Image (spheres, rainbow, N blue to C red):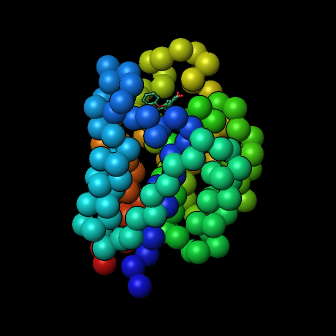
Amino acid sequence: MAKTIYVLNGPNLNLLGTREPEKYGRATLADVEELCRDAGKRFGLAIEFRQSNHEGAIVEWIQEAAREQALGVVLNPAGYTTTSVAILDAILAVKIPVIEVHITNIHARESFRHDSYVSRAARAVICGFGVDGYVLAISGLAAMTGAAKS
Ligand code: CA2
């Protein structure tokens, strides 16, 4: 059975490609899912791709990923990045690696976007590569877990 990477997306990312294209680009979340599935195939990995506007759903999915012994989680926490102790605690409670991804370079934006709770527990952080950051995160997870060799 192929190992699975959970790709989790936080609030408002369902709007990707439909608003603020100058910031977030024109790719939709469905396009991002396709990019992730293609990247997964290259490494023989299954992708579980989800989005929610609710903090608790993201907490439950991180716990589910660990229970299901997923290879890891790629997480764009979006607006919960700098507010959610609950998501931080969920990441701290699991042993699987979580890679934090942001489409934009959050450090070049407003200061309230800089101080990520998620970064305190994430194994790695990728930001500013646009939606290609998701592919980089999957590739990085495959490499750090040894899945890239098999
Ligand atoms: O750059 C990123 O990926 C962010 O996580 C996106 C979040 C923002 O709060 C973070 O600071 C950085 C915003 C997600 C909202 O997504 C939208 C996409 C298109 C149109 C409207 C919202």
Q: Residue at 34% across / 33% down in the picture?
A: 17
Q: Is residue 104 above or below residue 38?
A: above
Q: Position of residue 29 (x, y in %)?
A: 38, 44
Q: Is residue 44 above or below residue 137?
A: below
Relative horizontal placement of residue 37, taking residue 50 as reference (left or right): left
Q: Residue at 51% across / 49% down in the picture?
A: 51
| Foreground residue among 14 and 79 | 14
Question: Residue pushed farthest top?
Answer: 110
Q: Residue at 30% across / 42% down in the picture?
A: 132
| Foreground residue among 4 and 26 | 26
Look at the image and tell me in which quarter the N terminus lies: bottom left
Look at the image and tell me in which quarter the C terminus lies: bottom left
Q: Position of residue 85 (x, y in %)?
A: 75, 41
| Foreground residue among 83 and 122 | 83
Count of numbered circles in the view: 0
Q: Position of residue 90 (x, y in %)?
A: 70, 54
Question: Residue pushed farthest bottom?
Answer: 1
Residue 128 found in image quarter: top left
Q: Is residue 47 above or below residue 108?
A: below
Inspect this view and state whether residue 116 appears: no
Relative horizontal placement of residue 124, taking residue 103 as reference (left or right): right
Q: Is residue 6 above or below residue 126?
A: below
Q: Residue at 28% across / 52% down in the picture?
A: 35
Residue 143 found in image quarter: bottom left
Q: Position of residue 18 (x, y in %)?
A: 36, 30
